Image (spheres, rainbow, N blue to C red):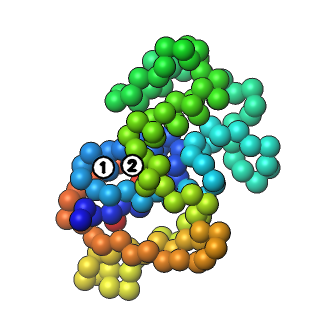
Amino acid sequence: MPDKVAIIGAGASGLTAARQAIAYGFEPVIFEKLSDLGGIWRYSENPNVRSVSWSTTNTSSKELSAFSDFAPSEAYSKFMHHTEVLNYLEAYAAHFKLREHIKFDTEVTLVARADDWEQTGDWVITYNDKCNACIMKFKHSNKSFIMSTALVTL
């Protein structure tokens, strides 16, 4: 069984971190507090949810903004509207089968060293999944894995 890594957030950074975790032989567990992926690119009128404005268009071209392992659709605008960026992220997640690793409606409330951290290097993630308060322990891995700030290497 592969070592697990915790990734907080299923936005652009979280999705690419998960993709790389899989490529390096890890099993990502992506904690996403909202009910769908996309991070700030999923527009919301809820003032408690951070998101782009309805009129947001990316200021860098799709060629410069694209992930190196997944080209955006030719049908997308050169400077993608936020709906196209969201569609791109959804297509990326589908292509690399990332949804199966996402725990939606799950808010991380604490990342802390386990009580036996000095001996094991283990970490504990405390989270709420809308139904329960839960704790998940991640074993320390001797493998090196350096990724985005969205990744907690555990």
Q: Quadrant of residue 84?
A: top right
Tell me the quarter of the image containing the C terminus. Answer: bottom left
Where disc 2 sits, the SS reads helix
Q: Residue at x 72, y 50 (%)?
A: 49
- Residue at label 1? 22
Q: Which residue is mark 2?
A: 18
Q: Is 111 displayed left or right of 21 in the figure?
A: right
How many marks the image carries: the answer is: 2
Q: Amino acid at mark 2?
A: Ala
* 35 with respect to 143 (left or right): right
**Residue 5 picture location, percent across and down:** 36, 61
* In the foreground, 122 or 75: 75
| Residue found at the far bottom of this picture | 115
Q: Is residue 102 above or below residue 92?
A: below
Distance, label 1 to label 2, CA atoms, is: 6 Å
Decide: is 97 above or below 59: below
Viewer-closest of 112 and 98: 98
Task: Name above or below for residue 81 compared with residue 113.
Answer: above
